[in-house]
Amino acid sequence: MKQNRNSIMRGASGALGEELVFRQRAGKTVISLPPVPREDNPTGDQVEVRSKFKEANRYAKTATADPALKVAYKAKARPGMSAFNVAMVDFFKAPEILEVDVTTYTGLSGEPILIMATDDFKVKSVKVSILNIEGEEIESGEAMAHPESDDFWTYTTTAANPDGASGIIKVEVSDLPGNLTKRELSL
C-alpha cells in the first residue's frame, strides 16, 4: 500500500514489530507485510537461477561502484529504477545480432563487412572471423563502431580469401556484463 499524504509515515523505513515493514520506493513510502521465511528444498533449476541472480547482483554492485558507469546506467533508468536495477537487467539480457551484410565481400583485402548489433544497454565489442571452405581461419579481428550509431559496426578485411567469396563468417557480439551472442553464416 502506498502512502501519499500521510505526513506521519512519510520517509519511514524499517519494521514495526513483526506486523509491518516500511520501505521507500521511487520517493514513496510503501507499507507491506514482512517477508515470510520458508524452508525449501530447491530443485537443480532453482539453484541455477539463484546462482545466476547472485552473479547479476555481484556485477551490478561492481558496475555501480564505477562512477562513470553508474551515471550511464542511471541515465537509462525509468522513473523509480536505480542504476543498480538497470545493471541487473543488463546482466540478464544478451546482445542481439540483427544483420550481417556481406553483399560487398568478394574475398579481397580491404572490403567492409557491416554488422548491425544491439543491446538493452551497450554493445561492448564485435569480433569477426573469416574461415575458408575447409574451416581454417583466414583472418579475424575487431569491428569498429560507427560514430553516428551504437548499433552499426564495420569490419574491414585484412587478408585475401583464396576461395574468393566463399567460406564461413563468424560474428561474436559481447556486452558489458560479458554476455556473448554468436552467429555463423556461409559466404
Image (spheres, rainbow, N blue to C red):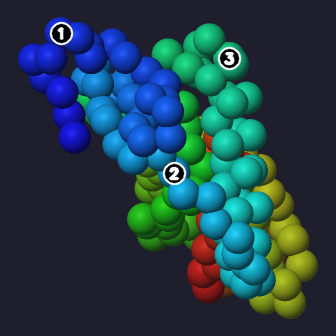
Q: Given the image, on which type of amino acid does mark 1 rest?
A: Ser
CA distance separating discs 2 and 1: 25 Å
Image position of 88 with respect to 135: above or below: above
Question: Which of pointers 3 and 2 lies earlier in the amino acid sequence?
Answer: 2
Image position of 133 with respect to 64: above or below: below
Quarter of the picture holding the C terminus: bottom right
Of circles 1 and 3, the one toward us is 1
Can you identify the residue that label 2 sits on?
Answer: 35
Q: Which mark is residue 29?
A: none
Q: Nearer the viewer, residue 44 or 38?
A: 38
Disc 3 packing (10 Å; few <14; some 14–19; many ≥20): few
User: Residue 49: x percent and y percent?
Assistant: 67, 68
Residue at screen point 18% across, 9% down: 7
User: Residue 56: x percent and y percent?
Assistant: 67, 48
CA distance separating discs 1 and 3: 36 Å
Work out whether residue 153 can be spotted: no
User: Residue 78: x percent and y percent?
Assistant: 29, 33
Quarter of the picture holding the N terminus: top left
Left or right: 144 as drawn, with respect to 89: right
Q: Is mark 3 on a helix, strand or loop?
A: loop
Disc 1 packing (10 Å; few <14; some 14–19; many ≥20): few
Q: Given the image, on which type of amino acid does mark 2 rest?
A: Pro
Q: Which mark is residue 7?
A: 1
Can you identify the residue that label 3 sits on?
Answer: 66
CA distance separating discs 3 and 2: 32 Å
Q: Is mark 1 on a helix, strand or loop?
A: loop
Of circles 3 and 2, the one toward us is 2
Q: Given the image, on which type of amino acid does mark 3 rest?
A: Asp
Q: Is mark 2 on a helix, strand or loop?
A: loop
Residue at screen point 64% across, 36% down: 60
